[in-house]
Image: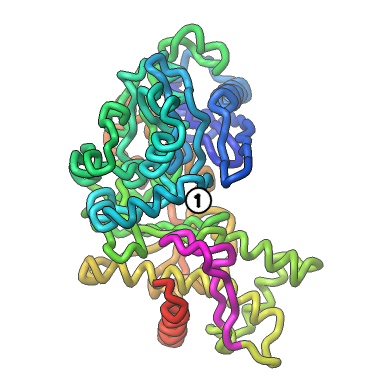
């Protein structure tokens, strides 16, 4: 039997699973991912802690599975995408992990926007924000002595994989699913952009080589094998970013499949066949694990958290099952009530001072109306993303949406999204999407899978379809227009 290990190095936790040759998870493990918060907006993580906790999660998964460790054919890691970690020439960490949540580089973000926003969007696919480029500039500007020691900047998954394999900085790598966050890439060409590097005086030698997620970057070193519970010599793949791994685990590696990650953040992405950056900055362009597939996507920071907030503050004695049942009797549009879901600022495009609010409520509105409007607000935001994407594609693409994460367990919310977006909304048979994605990457990298889209079709099945109600769709079109006007009036689009 061949087995594959996938691990997810997340912001608030680390998970690992061991999969058999049928890609059934037969062992799992977990570890802590600890955020260190300091004054001035600093949010960092200790690279040593990330490494040891990942090792413990993998070791736990292997032990729980009961498989012969000699059957493990490959490992792959995904991780947080927008932060950076500096290493020296011997792969020792010389900076903490500068988290994607860390806002210390605000001045550098603004400088990049002023000097090169259009070029950065056009070349990397995303508007300048708290990601690799401005963070690298922050370290250069504020800690030049540390910056001088950095031989390469990497991400947590690459750091763990490289250390496991005993790499040196000359072997540092970045798989292409991270490129839109890099700040200095020509994402379509899979190269570092000389113009951007020169404009911001960043040495190209401090950036890792760009590789496919399926690249074998090394093998498990004997001195690290025991900590991970795997034999020395097991091949390790480059892996990919956590979002890209989720999209793979949902099966969105073919054109026309959209993904709704209905979790803490609410993410909508559409699989397309071209690099399609949005000059307005409403959505962004990123690469799939598959070279010819791209995503056009955006997200609501804390979109899923709004439901928890609403229940805790307004309906603490009720559960979501009861709340969802109550709103089924309320018609689409919540009686004219519209909710803006950006309670702590808009995440993308970044409008940090934006705040959530309701518009149009009267004494006729009940708790159920307010709750339904929270669900609809996320769908209205998604509709803006969809319209932006299709306007650049000239509307020549039909698609279905696959829902994942906790929010996809709500039938009423799924139907709302189908009606608002005017397309089929599907739930699937898998919940282990990020870890499944990494197991598939490990299998392809080691030659055990040849056709990844075909493998995804076999493993990931639609188990329920919500068809749009055409009458509701027409009513929602008016609400979407009103929602967009609300954002325009606030100067946020």
Q: Look at the magenta stretch and give its main secondary structure.
A: loop
Q: Is residue 292 left or right of residue 94?
A: left
Give me the residue at 52% from left, 58% from top: 301
Q: Position of residue 254 (x, y in %)?
A: 29, 51
Q: Image quadrant for the C terminus?
A: bottom left
**In this orientation, does residue 470 appear?**
no
Q: Nearer the viewer, residue 36 or 231?
A: 36
Q: Secondary structure at mark 1?
A: loop
Would you identify the image quadrant in which residue 273 lies?
A: bottom left
> Looking at the image, is 440 positioned above or below residue 372?
above
Task: Look at the image and give the residue range highlighted in magenta.
Answer: 338-360
Q: Position of residue 76 (x, y in %)?
A: 43, 29
Within 10 angstroms of label 1, few (less than 14), some, or many (20 or more) residues?
A: few
**In this orientation, does residue 179 appear?**
yes
Q: Nearer the viewer, residue 352 or 244?
A: 352
Give me the residue at 44% from left, 66% from top: 425
Q: Is residue 349 magenta?
A: yes
Q: Is residue 425 left or right of residue 192?
A: right
Of all residues, the one furthest to the right in this rendering is 317
Q: Is residue 183 left or right of residue 46?
A: left
Of all residues, the one furthest to the top in this rendering is 222
Q: Position of residue 65 (x, y in %)?
A: 59, 25
Q: Is residue 56 left or right of residue 149?
A: right
Residue matched to label 1 = 429
> Looking at the image, is 448 positioned above or below residue 397?
above
Q: Nearer the viewer, residue 430 or 1?
A: 430
Would you identify the image quadrant in which residue 481 lies?
A: bottom left
Would you identify the image quadrant in which residue 364 lies?
A: bottom right
Give me the residue at 44% from left, 81% from top: 489
Q: Position of residue 193 (x, y in %)?
A: 21, 41
> Looking at the image, is 322 positioned above or below residue 218?
below
Q: Is residue 408 magenta?
A: no
């Amino acid at each position: 039997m061949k087995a594959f290990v996938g691990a997810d190095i997340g912001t608030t936790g680390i998970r690992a699973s061991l999969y058999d040759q049928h890609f059934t998870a037969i062992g799992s493990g977990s570890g802590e991912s600890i955020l260190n918060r300091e004054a001035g907006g600093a949010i960092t993580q200790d690279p040593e802690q990330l490494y040891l906790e990942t090792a413990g999660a993998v070791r736990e998964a292997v032990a729980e599975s009961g498989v012969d460790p000699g059957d493990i054919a490959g490992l792959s890691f995904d991780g947080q995408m927008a932060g950076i970690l500096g290493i020296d020439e011997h792969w020792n960490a010389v900076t903490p992990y500068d988290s994607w949540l860390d806002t210390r580089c605000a001045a550098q973000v603004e400088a990049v926007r002023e000097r090169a926003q259009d070029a950065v969007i056009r070349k990397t696919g995303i508007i300048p924000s708290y990601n690799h480029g401005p963070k690298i500039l922050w370290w250069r500007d504020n800690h030049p002595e540390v910056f001088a020691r950095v031989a390469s900047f990497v991400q947590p998954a690459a750091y763990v994989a490289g250390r496991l394999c005993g790499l040196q900085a000359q072997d540092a790598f970045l798989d292409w699913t991270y490129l839109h966050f890099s700040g200095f890439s020509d994402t379509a060409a899979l190269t570092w952009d000389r113009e951007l590097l020169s404009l911001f005086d960043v040495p190209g030698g401090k950036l890792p080589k760009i590789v496919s997620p399926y690249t074998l970057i090394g093998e498990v070193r004997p001195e690290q094998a025991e900590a991970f519970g795997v034999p020395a010599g097991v091949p390790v793949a480059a892996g990919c970013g956590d979002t890209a791994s989720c999209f793979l685990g949902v099966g969105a590696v073919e054109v026309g499949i959209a993904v709704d990650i209905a979790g803490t953040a609410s993410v909508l992405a559409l699989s397309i066949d071209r690099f399609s950056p949005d000059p307005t900055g409403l959505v962004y362009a990123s690469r799939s694990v598959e070279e010819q597939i791209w995503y056009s996507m955006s997200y609501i920071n804390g979109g899923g958290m709004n439901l928890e907030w609403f229940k805790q503050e307004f309906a603490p004695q009720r559960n979501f099952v009861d709340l969802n049942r109550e709103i089924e009797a309320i018609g689409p549009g919540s009686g004219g009530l519209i909710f803006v879901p950006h309670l702590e600022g808009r995440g993308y495009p970044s409008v940090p001072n934006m705040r959530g609010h309701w518009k149009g409520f009267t004494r006729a509105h009940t708790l159920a109306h307010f709750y339904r409007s929270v669900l609809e607000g996320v769908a209205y935001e998604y509709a803006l993303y969809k319209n932006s994407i299709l306007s650049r594609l000239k509307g020549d693409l039909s698609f279905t949406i696959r829902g994942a994460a906790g929010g996809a367990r709500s039938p009423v919310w799924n139907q709302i999204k189908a009606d608002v977006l005017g397309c089929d909304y599907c739930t699937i048979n898998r919940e282990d999407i990020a870890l499944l994605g990494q197991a598939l990457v490990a299998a392809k990298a080691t030659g055990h899978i040849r056709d990844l889209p075909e493998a995804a079709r076999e493993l990931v099945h639609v188990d329920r379809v919500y068809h749009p109600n055409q009458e509701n769709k027409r009513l929602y079109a008016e609400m979407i227009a009103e929602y967009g006007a609300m954002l325009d009036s606030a100067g946020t689009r």
